Image (cartoon, rainbow, N blue to C red):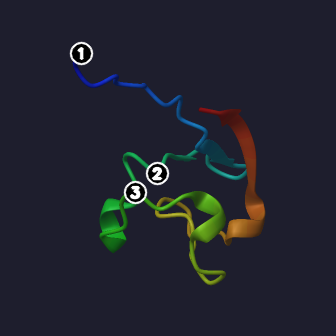
Amino acid sequence: MGKKVVLKESTTALYKCRICGYVYSPEKGDEKRAIKGIPFERLPDNWRCPVCYYPKSHFYQIKKG
């Protein structure tokens, strides 16, 4: 018999900036800072929105991908 392939559902959340509406997605990342594939929760505390430069604390979870 062949190998069994199990597709894993993504559990990565999307976060939206309360100020400008920018959505952080780990798949897309933050091109300005060369960040990709990092969940929002693991971004450095000093990370800021690449559009309006507000801090992480101004983001809220919108979707559990």
Which one is in front in this view, the residue at disc 3 or the one at disc 1? 1
Q: CA distance from mark 1 to mark 2?
A: 36 Å
> Do the residues bearing badges 2 and 3 touch, measured as CB atoms within 8 Å?
yes
Q: Which residue is mark 1?
A: 1
Tell me where residue 35 sits by quadrant. bottom left
Q: CA distance from mark 2 to mark 3?
A: 5 Å
Q: Secondary structure at mark 2?
A: loop
**Neighbours of disc 2 within 10 Å: few (<14), some (14-19), many (20+):** some
Q: CA distance from mark 3 to mark 1?
A: 34 Å
Q: Secondary structure at mark 1?
A: loop
Q: Quadrant of the N terminus?
A: top left
Q: Which residue is mark 2?
A: 26
**Neighbours of disc 1 within 10 Å: few (<14), some (14-19), many (20+):** few
Q: Which residue is mark 3?
A: 37
Where is residue 3? Give x, y as percent: 27, 25
Query: In the image, 59: left or right of 34?
Result: right
Where is residue 45? Give x, y as percent: 66, 81
Query: In the image, 26: left or right of 14?
Result: left
**Neighbours of disc 3 within 10 Å: few (<14), some (14-19), many (20+):** few
Where 32 falls versus 23 (above or below)?
Answer: below
